[in-house]
């Protein structure tokens, strides 16, 4: 093996390492935010369709709540759509990880001998 080819390979792997490291730091930070947000999603899931939610919705429809109160959570779609989106994002993350792991394991061309 020529020294030039070896240097080129190491340089390429170093670039890949730098990109992956930066992406991992960013993803880790965003994942921390996502995990914190999951507590909010769990509370919304518990609230949606509960006795309190139905009472709040009924009172809103009867005009018993202040007109300037933000009330998107009382719509039938807002929380549901958020829950569906959260589930889809979770599936997307898991699929990406599983696909990448499987692809990496089955790829030819990345071997110890190279």
Image (cartoon, grey):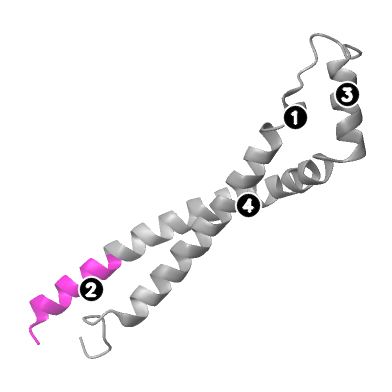
Residue 18 higher or lower than 46, as above or below: below
Report, in whole angstroms, how far the alpha carbon at label 2 lies from the one at label 3.
Answer: 66 Å
Which residue is at 20% across, 86% downward? 114
- Binning the other alpha carbons within 10 Å of mark 1 as few (below 14), some (14 to 19) or many (20 upward) gives some
Q: Which residues are magenta?
A: 1-14
| Label 4 vs label 1, nearer the camera | 1
Residue position marked by numbered label 1 in the rendering: 73
Residue 21 higher or lower than 10, as above or below: above
For the question of whether residue 29 can be seen, the reply is no
Residue 97 spot, x, y in % from top left = 47, 66
Residue 8 higher or lower than 106, as above or below: above
Which residue is at 77% across, 45% downward? 45
Residue position marked by numbered label 3 in the rendering: 58
Disc with the residue nearer the chain's start (3 vs 1): 3
Disc with the residue nearer the chain's start (4 vs 3): 4
Q: Residue 10 bears which disc, if any?
A: 2
């Amino acid at each position: 093996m020529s020294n030039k080819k070896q240097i080129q390979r190491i340089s390429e792997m170093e670039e890949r390492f730098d990109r992956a490291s930066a992406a991992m730091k960013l993803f880790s930070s965003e994942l921390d935010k996502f995990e914190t947000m999951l507590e909010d999603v769990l509370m919304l899931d518990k609230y949606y369709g509960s006795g309190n939610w139905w009472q709040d919705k009924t009172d809103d429809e009867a005009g018993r709540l202040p007109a300037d109160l933000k009330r998107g959570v009382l719509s039938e779609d807002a929380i549901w759509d958020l829950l569906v989106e959260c589930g889809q994002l979770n599936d997307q993350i898991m699929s990406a990880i599983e696909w990448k792991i499987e692809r990496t394991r089955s790829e030819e061309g990345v071997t110890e001998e190279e």
